[in-house]
Image: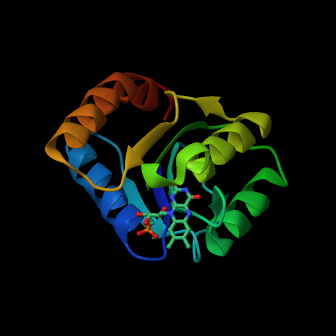
Amino acid sequence: MLSIIYATLSGHNLELAYYLKSQVASWPIQVTVEDAAAAGVPTGPLFFCPATYGEGELSDEGADFLTELSSRQFPHPYWVVGIGDQCYGDDFCGAVSFADQTLAAAGGTRLAPPLCIDYELSAEVKEQLNVTLEHLKESILDQS
Ligand SMILES: Cc1cc2nc3c(=O)[nH]c(=O)nc-3n(C[C@H](O)[C@H](O)[C@H](O)COP(=O)(O)O)c2cc1C
């Protein structure tokens, strides 16, 4: 089962998670979308979509989820992709980079470089997501 988990305050990363779900709907794998505030530790491949607040930090729900997940080994494929805001300069999508590093340190297998999205799901961003998903597809289906 592929888990798509988002951490959001104002909904952009929820929208991203459901966009990813719609794009993998035809894959021969079960897919769930969950809020990090309520999600358990995934037992298979993970797409994590964390919002960035503060100074490049995860939201509280995102941080709690990641702490729980990294308190044990996470021997699964993962990809971190999130929406932030480039106006925040060096802190742009800090949560995305942090989550990517944390999951790698917990034993996860990075499926693709972390992807930082500036504010909204434009047609150009959707195309970029679709290209990455096409690359990820085989690895995920092979390993699940
Ligand atoms: C108080 C505050 C702090 C923020 N800090 C950052 C930041 O450090 N880096 C970043 O990329 N975006 C930052 N943002 C922008 C949010 O990440 C952006 O609005 C994003 O779409 C929120 O995601 P969400 O709608 O899923 O909660 C900040 C927004 C607010 C309101």
Residue 29 spot, x, y in % from top left? 35, 44
Q: Residue at x 22, y 53 (%)?
A: 22
Specify whether 1 is left or right of 89. left
Say whether residue 33 is visible.
yes
Q: Camera-side residue: 5 or 124?
A: 124
Determine the residue positioned at 19% across, 38% down. 124
In this rendering, the count of numbered labels is: 0
> In this rendering, is residue 37 above or below 99?
below
Which picture quadrant has residue 102?
A: top right
Q: Residue at x 70, y 58 (%)?
A: 66
Q: x, y (%) of residue 56?
A: 64, 55
Q: Position of residue 113 (x, y in %)?
A: 52, 28
Whether residue 62 sits left or right of residue 14 in the image: it is right
- In the picture, residue 24 is in which quadrant? top left
Residue appearing at x 68%, y 46% in the figure: 98
Please indicate whether residue 42 sits to the left or right of residue 130 in the image: right
Q: Is residue 104 above or below residue 56?
A: above
Looking at the image, which residue sits at the far right? 71
- Seen in the picture, residue 64 relative to 23 is either above or below; the reply is below
